[in-house]
Image (cartoon, grey):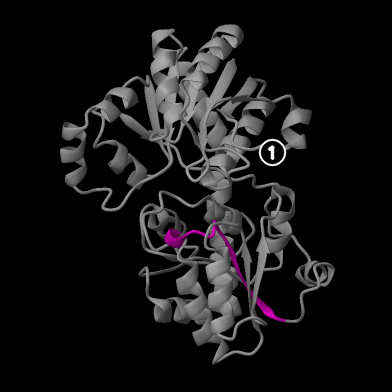
Amino acid sequence: MKIALVSDWYYPKTGGVATHIRDLALHLRNRGHEVMIVTNNHGVHDDKELDEKGVSIYRVSGLTVPLLSTNISPYASRELRNLLSRENPDIFHAHHAFTPLSLRGMAMAKEENFPTVLTTHSIFLAYDSPVWDIFNKAFPVLGWFIDRADRIIAVSNAAKAFISHFTQKQVAVIPNGVDSKKFHPNWNKERLREDLGIEEERIILCVSRLSYRKGIHVLLNAMKILTDEMDDIRLIILGEGEMFLLLRTQAKSLDLENRVSFMGYVPSQQLPKFYGMTDVFVLPSITAEAFGIVLLEAMASGKPVVATNVGGIPEVVESSNCGILVDPWDEYALAEAIFSLLEDESLRNELGRNGRKAVENRYSWDIIAEKIERVYQEIV
């Protein structure tokens, strides 16, 4: 099949949606499909692996809104229509329900009779509240766009609960996936730390966009609590975002400059090494998180996780028995959970094994790509 994956949310904008689209494209290509990614022209990202695998990337031009990384120009519609007419895909697969290119693209695909799939990756505050039903009745246009899809996929039950406020259609839950060959537990931790210039310290890793809702500021407060008890720990933060300067200032004010390393954006190919040398992985989100692909990367790497009890995160952690959940905003509970894992190697190893087993049984991209492929086959 010829498959078009369409979203405003793609590189150079980082995050779980971009990672999902990229990995799905690669695994569909490996399964013999012809794959194209369509996104906006907000920046350029060089992805040699996609090029080498024969995945095409098209960027529709127009006026972009940098803070939102969305394309609002009517020229984007014209270019998208011309692109679809020229390429004639068998499947139009939109990602991230509430973005302009996905919504506009689904309506266009429906007009042209392209079989259409929508994957929703996000949730909002109080995602299971009836307030959203009222919102949909007041602004039914969103539901109209979403109903253009022939099939709807949600990455978690939390994401399903949210999108169901806007449609009566059946929603299938197919979680995010992870490359279990790329992310694995068979690293020489000491060698990795030596190669990366890391001293003999216990490592806490956080991979996240540096935005307010990700809760990195709460993690820094927890780190201050931990350093009062431990003098051999280091927090490594991978990612970039609008909170970088504020977070670095906070770390300095907490006297954590020698205990926290902000590494910025790290290419996908380098991520497994950082997971490989880690003792504990932390995802401290304070608001709704539909899933969290980084959880799967840590689990595939055999690392225990500490995460907050929000959105779809508990679905992954509790069903896999791979870590400890804490309430959002609670820096003391966060510090205590990290402390308990750092002090108990046996528990770290047990939770790490559980996470790896869950990935192999449920979250490997080989499994997830096959499930998505079956959805395509239902509508072609």
Identified by mark 1, the residue type is: His
Q: What's the residue at 83%, 72% (across, down)?
A: 194
Q: Is residue 144 visible?
A: yes
Give the image location of residue 326, x and y in percent: 39, 70
* In magenta stretch: residue 209: yes
Q: What's the residue at 40%, 44% (across, down)?
A: 122
In the image, residue 54 sits, relative to residue 250, either above or below, namely above
Give the image location of residue 246, x and y in percent: 53, 69
Give the image location of residue 295, x and y in percent: 53, 56
Return the residue nearer the eye: 109 or 240. 240
Q: Residues within 10 Å of mark 1 (few under 14, many from 20)?
A: few
Q: What's the residue at 44%, 14% (across, down)?
A: 109
> Along the horizontal axis of the image, is 306 left or right of 145?
right
Residue at the extreme front: 63
* In magenta stretch: residue 360: no
> Along the horizontal axis of the image, is 158 left or right of 8?
left
Task: Locate the N terminus by quadrant.
Answer: top right
Q: Which residue is mark 1?
A: 45
The boundaries of the magenta stretch are 201-213
